[in-house]
Image: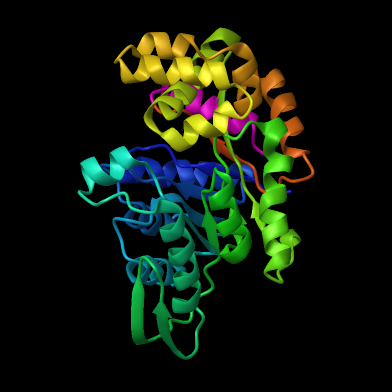
Protein backbone atom coordinates (compact mmCIF):
# COMPACT_ATOMS: atom_id res chain seq x y z
CA UNK A 1 0.00 0.00 0.00
CA UNK A 2 1.22 3.46 -0.84
CA UNK A 3 1.04 6.26 1.68
CA UNK A 4 1.40 10.01 1.60
CA UNK A 5 2.11 12.92 3.87
CA UNK A 6 0.90 16.51 3.86
CA UNK A 7 3.75 19.01 3.84
CA UNK A 8 3.60 21.29 6.89
CA UNK A 9 3.37 25.00 6.27
CA UNK A 10 6.96 26.19 6.32
CA UNK A 11 9.19 28.46 4.28
CA UNK A 12 10.10 27.03 0.90
CA UNK A 13 13.60 25.78 1.71
CA UNK A 14 12.38 24.07 4.87
CA UNK A 15 9.55 22.49 2.88
CA UNK A 16 12.02 21.15 0.32
CA UNK A 17 14.11 19.57 3.06
CA UNK A 18 11.02 18.05 4.63
CA UNK A 19 9.94 16.54 1.30
CA UNK A 20 13.37 14.98 0.84
CA UNK A 21 13.16 13.54 4.33
CA UNK A 22 9.75 12.03 3.56
CA UNK A 23 11.08 10.53 0.35
CA UNK A 24 14.02 9.03 2.25
CA UNK A 25 11.56 7.55 4.77
CA UNK A 26 9.72 5.75 1.97
CA UNK A 27 6.59 7.83 1.52
CA UNK A 28 5.07 7.62 -1.96
CA UNK A 29 3.59 11.11 -2.22
CA UNK A 30 3.88 14.56 -0.72
CA UNK A 31 0.72 16.64 -0.73
CA UNK A 32 0.20 20.26 0.16
CA UNK A 33 -2.87 22.11 1.31
CA UNK A 34 -3.72 25.71 0.61
CA UNK A 35 -5.70 28.21 2.61
CA UNK A 36 -3.82 31.48 2.99
CA UNK A 37 -0.18 32.49 2.92
CA UNK A 38 1.28 29.67 0.85
CA UNK A 39 0.49 28.87 -2.78
CA UNK A 40 0.14 25.13 -3.41
CA UNK A 41 1.48 25.03 -6.96
CA UNK A 42 4.44 27.29 -6.27
CA UNK A 43 5.30 25.15 -3.25
CA UNK A 44 5.14 21.89 -5.21
CA UNK A 45 7.18 23.34 -8.06
CA UNK A 46 9.85 24.32 -5.55
CA UNK A 47 9.80 20.79 -4.12
CA UNK A 48 9.91 19.09 -7.52
CA UNK A 49 13.63 19.37 -8.20
CA UNK A 50 14.55 18.35 -4.65
CA UNK A 51 12.96 14.89 -4.85
CA UNK A 52 13.39 12.07 -7.32
CA UNK A 53 10.58 9.53 -7.17
CA UNK A 54 7.55 10.66 -5.15
CA UNK A 55 4.27 11.94 -6.48
CA UNK A 56 3.28 15.53 -5.75
CA UNK A 57 -0.30 16.46 -5.01
CA UNK A 58 -2.64 19.18 -3.83
CA UNK A 59 -4.82 18.32 -0.86
CA UNK A 60 -6.56 20.49 -1.42
CA UNK A 61 -7.00 23.54 -3.64
CA UNK A 62 -10.47 25.04 -3.80
CA UNK A 63 -12.68 25.23 -6.89
CA UNK A 64 -13.73 28.87 -6.47
CA UNK A 65 -10.57 30.99 -6.41
CA UNK A 66 -9.12 29.51 -9.63
CA UNK A 67 -11.02 28.60 -12.78
CA UNK A 68 -11.03 25.02 -14.01
CA UNK A 69 -8.76 26.13 -16.85
CA UNK A 70 -6.27 27.69 -14.42
CA UNK A 71 -6.23 24.56 -12.28
CA UNK A 72 -5.71 22.37 -15.34
CA UNK A 73 -2.90 24.56 -16.66
CA UNK A 74 -1.15 24.69 -13.28
CA UNK A 75 -1.31 20.93 -12.83
CA UNK A 76 -0.23 20.28 -16.42
CA UNK A 77 2.75 22.61 -16.01
CA UNK A 78 3.70 20.89 -12.76
CA UNK A 79 3.87 17.53 -14.57
CA UNK A 80 6.77 18.92 -16.61
CA UNK A 81 8.98 19.33 -13.55
CA UNK A 82 7.62 16.71 -11.13
CA UNK A 83 9.86 13.63 -10.94
CA UNK A 84 6.95 11.20 -10.85
CA UNK A 85 3.20 11.77 -10.89
CA UNK A 86 1.00 14.75 -10.11
CA UNK A 87 -2.31 14.32 -8.31
CA UNK A 88 -4.74 17.22 -8.31
CA UNK A 89 -6.89 17.29 -5.19
CA UNK A 90 -9.76 19.79 -5.34
CA UNK A 91 -12.58 20.66 -3.01
CA UNK A 92 -15.24 23.25 -2.25
CA UNK A 93 -13.48 24.54 0.90
CA UNK A 94 -15.72 26.46 3.30
CA UNK A 95 -18.09 29.40 3.09
CA UNK A 96 -15.79 31.36 5.42
CA UNK A 97 -12.72 30.89 3.20
CA UNK A 98 -14.44 31.49 -0.10
CA UNK A 99 -16.53 34.50 0.85
CA UNK A 100 -14.36 36.24 3.45
CA UNK A 101 -10.94 35.56 1.90
CA UNK A 102 -11.59 35.27 -1.83
CA UNK A 103 -14.64 37.50 -2.03
CA UNK A 104 -16.58 34.95 -4.07
CA UNK A 105 -20.12 33.71 -3.55
CA UNK A 106 -20.19 30.24 -2.03
CA UNK A 107 -22.76 29.20 -4.58
CA UNK A 108 -23.69 25.54 -5.25
CA UNK A 109 -20.38 24.13 -3.99
CA UNK A 110 -21.12 20.49 -4.82
CA UNK A 111 -22.21 21.26 -8.36
CA UNK A 112 -19.15 23.43 -8.86
CA UNK A 113 -16.93 20.62 -7.56
CA UNK A 114 -18.54 18.17 -9.98
CA UNK A 115 -18.24 20.44 -13.01
CA UNK A 116 -14.69 21.55 -12.18
CA UNK A 117 -13.50 17.94 -11.90
CA UNK A 118 -15.21 17.01 -15.15
CA UNK A 119 -13.84 20.04 -16.97
CA UNK A 120 -10.28 19.55 -15.71
CA UNK A 121 -10.40 16.00 -17.07
CA UNK A 122 -11.48 17.37 -20.45
CA UNK A 123 -8.84 20.12 -20.37
CA UNK A 124 -6.02 17.60 -19.74
CA UNK A 125 -7.24 14.83 -22.07
CA UNK A 126 -4.61 15.59 -24.69
CA UNK A 127 -6.77 15.76 -27.79
CA UNK A 128 -9.50 17.81 -29.37
CA UNK A 129 -10.96 21.14 -28.41
CA UNK A 130 -12.98 21.58 -25.25
CA UNK A 131 -16.58 22.73 -25.18
CA UNK A 132 -18.47 22.49 -21.92
CA UNK A 133 -21.86 23.88 -21.01
CA UNK A 134 -22.40 23.46 -17.29
CA UNK A 135 -24.60 25.04 -14.67
CA UNK A 136 -21.75 26.81 -12.86
CA UNK A 137 -19.17 27.09 -15.65
CA UNK A 138 -19.19 27.02 -19.43
CA UNK A 139 -16.25 27.15 -21.85
CA UNK A 140 -15.97 26.96 -25.62
CA UNK A 141 -13.44 26.00 -28.25
CA UNK A 142 -10.08 25.77 -26.51
CA UNK A 143 -7.54 22.99 -27.15
CA UNK A 144 -6.99 20.29 -24.56
CA UNK A 145 -3.61 19.97 -22.87
CA UNK A 146 -1.75 16.67 -22.88
CA UNK A 147 -1.13 15.86 -19.21
CA UNK A 148 -1.64 12.86 -16.96
CA UNK A 149 -3.43 14.50 -14.03
CA UNK A 150 -5.75 12.31 -11.97
CA UNK A 151 -8.33 14.43 -10.16
CA UNK A 152 -9.17 13.71 -6.53
CA UNK A 153 -12.18 15.30 -4.86
CA UNK A 154 -12.48 16.23 -1.20
CA UNK A 155 -16.06 15.07 -0.77
CA UNK A 156 -17.81 14.69 2.57
CA UNK A 157 -21.59 14.66 2.16
CA UNK A 158 -23.59 12.23 0.02
CA UNK A 159 -24.08 14.65 -2.87
CA UNK A 160 -20.36 15.37 -3.12
CA UNK A 161 -19.58 11.67 -2.87
CA UNK A 162 -21.97 11.00 -5.74
CA UNK A 163 -20.07 13.60 -7.79
CA UNK A 164 -16.87 11.75 -6.93
CA UNK A 165 -18.30 8.50 -8.20
CA UNK A 166 -19.35 10.09 -11.47
CA UNK A 167 -16.24 12.03 -12.43
CA UNK A 168 -13.23 11.70 -10.08
CA UNK A 169 -10.16 9.47 -10.10
CA UNK A 170 -9.74 9.64 -6.33
CA UNK A 171 -11.52 10.50 -3.11
CA UNK A 172 -10.00 12.56 -0.27
CA UNK A 173 -12.22 12.05 2.79
CA UNK A 174 -11.41 14.18 5.81
CA UNK A 175 -13.23 14.03 9.13
CA UNK A 176 -15.33 11.06 8.11
CA UNK A 177 -14.81 8.69 11.05
CA UNK A 178 -12.68 5.74 10.01
CA UNK A 179 -15.34 3.15 10.98
CA UNK A 180 -17.74 4.97 8.62
CA UNK A 181 -15.42 5.06 5.60
CA UNK A 182 -16.58 1.83 4.00
CA UNK A 183 -20.27 2.72 4.16
CA UNK A 184 -19.52 6.27 2.97
CA UNK A 185 -17.60 4.89 0.00
CA UNK A 186 -20.60 2.82 -1.02
CA UNK A 187 -22.23 6.05 -2.22
CA UNK A 188 -19.18 6.67 -4.41
CA UNK A 189 -19.18 3.07 -5.64
CA UNK A 190 -22.88 2.91 -6.45
CA UNK A 191 -22.75 6.14 -8.41
CA UNK A 192 -19.62 5.02 -10.26
CA UNK A 193 -21.34 1.81 -11.32
CA UNK A 194 -24.40 3.74 -12.47
CA UNK A 195 -22.09 5.90 -14.60
CA UNK A 196 -20.46 2.83 -16.15
CA UNK A 197 -17.25 3.24 -14.19
CA UNK A 198 -15.33 0.72 -12.09
CA UNK A 199 -15.39 1.87 -8.45
CA UNK A 200 -12.19 -0.09 -7.79
CA UNK A 201 -10.42 2.47 -9.95
CA UNK A 202 -11.33 5.32 -7.59
CA UNK A 203 -8.38 5.73 -5.23
CA UNK A 204 -9.43 6.30 -1.62
CA UNK A 205 -6.91 8.55 0.12
CA UNK A 206 -8.17 9.59 3.56
CA UNK A 207 -6.57 12.28 5.65
CA UNK A 208 -5.21 10.74 8.84
CA UNK A 209 -4.58 13.49 11.41
CA UNK A 210 -1.65 12.16 13.42
CA UNK A 211 0.66 13.11 16.26
CA UNK A 212 3.32 11.08 18.04
CA UNK A 213 4.88 11.95 21.41
CA UNK A 214 6.50 10.20 24.34
CA UNK A 215 3.60 11.54 26.42
CA UNK A 216 0.40 10.25 24.80
CA UNK A 217 -1.62 13.12 26.25
CA UNK A 218 0.45 15.62 24.26
CA UNK A 219 -0.19 13.72 21.05
CA UNK A 220 -3.89 13.45 21.73
CA UNK A 221 -4.10 17.16 22.55
CA UNK A 222 -2.61 17.98 19.14
CA UNK A 223 -5.21 15.86 17.34
CA UNK A 224 -8.00 17.31 19.50
CA UNK A 225 -6.98 20.79 18.39
CA UNK A 226 -7.01 19.75 14.74
CA UNK A 227 -10.47 18.22 15.00
CA UNK A 228 -11.91 21.15 16.93
CA UNK A 229 -10.68 23.60 14.30
CA UNK A 230 -12.29 21.73 11.42
CA UNK A 231 -15.55 20.91 13.17
CA UNK A 232 -15.81 24.50 14.34
CA UNK A 233 -14.88 26.24 11.11
CA UNK A 234 -16.69 24.21 8.44
CA UNK A 235 -20.28 23.03 8.38
CA UNK A 236 -19.42 20.17 6.04
CA UNK A 237 -16.81 18.91 8.47
CA UNK A 238 -19.26 19.18 11.35
CA UNK A 239 -21.84 17.14 9.48
CA UNK A 240 -19.26 14.50 8.59
CA UNK A 241 -18.20 14.09 12.22
CA UNK A 242 -21.84 14.16 13.32
CA UNK A 243 -22.53 10.93 11.44
CA UNK A 244 -20.96 9.20 14.43
CA UNK A 245 -20.77 11.95 17.07
CA UNK A 246 -23.78 14.25 16.65
CA UNK A 247 -23.94 15.68 20.17
CA UNK A 248 -20.20 16.14 20.48
CA UNK A 249 -19.95 17.82 17.07
CA UNK A 250 -22.71 20.24 18.01
CA UNK A 251 -20.97 21.17 21.27
CA UNK A 252 -17.65 21.72 19.52
CA UNK A 253 -19.20 23.89 16.80
CA UNK A 254 -21.15 25.93 19.34
CA UNK A 255 -18.10 26.59 21.47
CA UNK A 256 -15.97 27.48 18.45
CA UNK A 257 -18.59 29.90 17.11
CA UNK A 258 -18.67 31.59 20.53
CA UNK A 259 -14.92 32.10 20.39
CA UNK A 260 -14.35 29.57 23.19
CA UNK A 261 -11.48 27.72 21.53
CA UNK A 262 -10.28 25.90 24.63
CA UNK A 263 -13.79 24.67 25.36
CA UNK A 264 -14.10 23.45 21.78
CA UNK A 265 -10.89 21.48 22.06
CA UNK A 266 -11.94 20.02 25.40
CA UNK A 267 -15.23 18.89 23.85
CA UNK A 268 -13.36 16.53 21.52
CA UNK A 269 -13.65 13.18 23.29
CA UNK A 270 -11.11 10.39 23.42
CA UNK A 271 -13.43 8.24 21.35
CA UNK A 272 -13.45 10.95 18.68
CA UNK A 273 -9.65 11.10 18.63
CA UNK A 274 -9.50 7.35 18.05
CA UNK A 275 -12.17 7.40 15.33
CA UNK A 276 -10.82 10.41 13.46
CA UNK A 277 -7.08 10.40 14.01
CA UNK A 278 -3.96 8.63 15.23
CA UNK A 279 -2.27 9.75 18.44
CA UNK A 280 0.05 8.30 21.04
CA UNK A 281 3.51 6.90 21.52
CA UNK A 282 5.37 5.67 18.42
CA UNK A 283 4.29 2.09 19.05
CA UNK A 284 0.65 2.95 19.71
CA UNK A 285 0.48 5.31 16.73
CA UNK A 286 1.99 2.72 14.37
CA UNK A 287 -0.55 0.13 15.48
CA UNK A 288 -3.43 2.55 15.04
CA UNK A 289 -2.21 3.75 11.67
CA UNK A 290 -1.83 0.14 10.52
CA UNK A 291 -5.43 -0.52 11.54
CA UNK A 292 -6.67 2.43 9.47
CA UNK A 293 -4.49 1.46 6.52
CA UNK A 294 -5.78 -2.11 6.59
CA UNK A 295 -9.40 -1.08 6.05
CA UNK A 296 -10.57 -2.67 2.81
CA UNK A 297 -11.64 0.66 1.36
CA UNK A 298 -8.35 2.51 1.98
CA UNK A 299 -5.75 2.71 -0.80
CA UNK A 300 -3.51 5.63 0.11
CA UNK A 301 -3.66 6.96 3.69
CA UNK A 302 -2.24 10.45 4.07
CA UNK A 303 -0.46 11.48 7.28
CA UNK A 304 -1.54 14.97 8.35
CA UNK A 305 0.40 16.43 11.27
CA UNK A 306 -1.74 19.13 12.95
CA UNK A 307 -0.76 22.75 12.46
CA UNK A 308 0.91 24.35 15.43
CA UNK A 309 2.93 21.42 16.71
CA UNK A 310 6.67 21.84 17.07
CA UNK A 311 9.17 20.54 14.54
CA UNK A 312 10.27 17.71 16.82
CA UNK A 313 6.72 16.37 16.98
CA UNK A 314 6.33 16.68 13.22
CA UNK A 315 9.57 14.79 12.58
CA UNK A 316 8.75 12.13 15.17
CA UNK A 317 5.33 11.59 13.64
CA UNK A 318 6.40 11.19 10.02
CA UNK A 319 9.25 8.92 11.10
CA UNK A 320 7.03 6.71 13.27
CA UNK A 321 4.36 6.34 10.56
CA UNK A 322 6.71 5.90 7.61
CA UNK A 323 6.44 2.74 5.49
Q: Is residue 73 left or right of residue 127?
A: left
Which secondary structure dominates the residues rendered in magenta?
A: helix
* Left or right position of 64 against 267: left
Residue situated in front as seen by the camera: 193 or 168: 193
Tell me residue 16's x, y (percent).
41, 47
| Residue at 51% across, 29% down | 315
Image coordinates of residue 290 in percent, x first then y, are: 74, 32
Q: Is residue 120 above or below residue 227?
A: below
Residue 183 position in % (x across, y down): 73, 41
Give yes or no for residue 297 being in the magenta stretch. no
Instruction: Examine the rendered structure and indicate whether residue 272 appears above or below residue 298.
Output: above
Viewer can see residue 49: no
Q: How is the image coloured?
A: rainbow
Residue at figure coordinates x 38%, y 14% from the top left: 255
Residue 264 image position (x, y, % from top left): 42, 14
State whether residue 242 is above or below residue 121: above
Residue 7 sits in quarter:
top left
Residue 6 shows in the view: yes
Looking at the rendering, which quadrant does residue 202 occupy?
bottom right
Viewed as shown, does residue 265 lie left or right of 216? left
Residue 309 belongs to magenta span: yes
Q: In front: 56, or 198?
A: 198
Which range is magenta? 308-323
Amino acid sequence: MSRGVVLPRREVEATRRFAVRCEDLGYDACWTGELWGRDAFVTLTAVADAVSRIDLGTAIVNVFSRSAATLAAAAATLTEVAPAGVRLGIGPSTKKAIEDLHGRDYDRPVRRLHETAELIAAFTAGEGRVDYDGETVSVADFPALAADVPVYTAALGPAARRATGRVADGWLPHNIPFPELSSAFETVAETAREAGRNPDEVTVAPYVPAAVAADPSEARAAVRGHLAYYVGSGEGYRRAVATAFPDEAARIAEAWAAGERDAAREAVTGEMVDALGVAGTPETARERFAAVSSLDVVDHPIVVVPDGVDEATTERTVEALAP
